[in-house]
Image: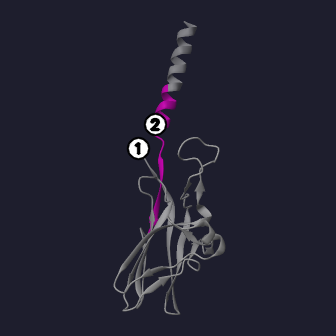
Amino acid sequence: MKSMWKTVFILGVGFALFWGIGCAPTLISVSSPEFQTADNSYYSAQFEPLSEGKNFFDRFRLKVVNKTPKDLEIDWNKTRYLYNGHDLGIFVFKGIQPKDIKNATIPPDIIPSGHTFSKEISPLKLIAREPLSGKGLNAGKITPGLIPDGESGILLFIRQNDTPVKEKMTVKITEKKLQK
């Protein structure tokens, strides 16, 4: 009889744990606003955090529309990632060369007159790297890292000829609990 009560007690505790874990809230990152915009006589820009199937943001999309009759140039060496009002360095993106990051010689992106430019970018300080000791295709792979809660933004540095045009755009990222 004592053994039966012990079994009932263990099953009850197990059921309670299963029920409690199964109903635990899921945390997801949200952005307020969803994206930020800037507009001046040279360009319209949009800065948007991206998650694509994840519960957290790990990169941004930058869109710029050239409103002038001349080319615009994005200076990636002077464009900065801002976190809670502090400059945390540059952004990186697919195709960038490590030597250009190290030497601050990242080539600019040119936006022709009337064209729209779009690129996914990640703060260099937040880049994640799979361990080299891992096995398989992901060993040493570099991926965008988690964008933390707080104010994240960009100080966009664009030039036309030798005239710099800077814009600051920020979003506030927070975690939100979702019940299953």
**Would you place residue 167 above or below residue 34 in this image?**
below
Provide residue 177's location: percent of width, then percent of height: 47, 52
- Quadrant of the image containing the C terminus: top left
Viewer-closest of 132 and 67: 132
Please give the name of the residue rendered at 41% of the width and 85% of the height, measured from the top-left corner.
43
Q: Which mark is residue 49?
A: none
Please give the name of the residue rendered at 53% of the width and 93% of the height, measured from the top-left corner.
162
Provide residue 114's location: percent of width, then percent of height: 34, 85
Q: Is residue 113 left or right of residue 73?
A: left
Viewer-closest of 109 and 157: 109
User: Seen from this angle, which residue lies furthest top?
Assistant: 1
The quadrant where residue 80 appears: bottom right
- Quadrant of the image containing the N terminus: top right
Please give the name of the residue rendered at 42% of the width and 46% of the height, measured from the top-left corner.
179
Viewer-closest of 57 and 97: 97
Q: Indicate whether residue 85 is drawn in magenta.
A: no
Q: Residues within 10 Å of mark 2 (few under 14, many from 20)?
A: few
Whole-angstrom CA distance, mark 1 to mark 2, is: 8 Å
Range of residues picked out in magenta: 15-32
Provide residue 5's location: percent of width, then percent of height: 54, 13
Q: Secondary structure at mark 2?
A: helix
- Residue to which mark 2 is pinned: 22
Query: Contact (CB < 8 A) between labels 1 and 2?
Result: yes
Q: Say which label, 1 or 2, has the lower sequence index.
A: 2
Query: As shown in the figure, which amino acid type bears the numbered disc 2?
Result: Gly
Viewer-closest of 180 and 169: 169
Q: Secondary structure at mark 1?
A: loop
Query: As shown in the figure, which amino acid type bears the numbered disc 1?
Result: Lys
The quadrant where residue 64 appears: bottom left
Provide residue 24's location: percent of width, then percent of height: 48, 42
Q: Which mark is residue 180?
A: 1
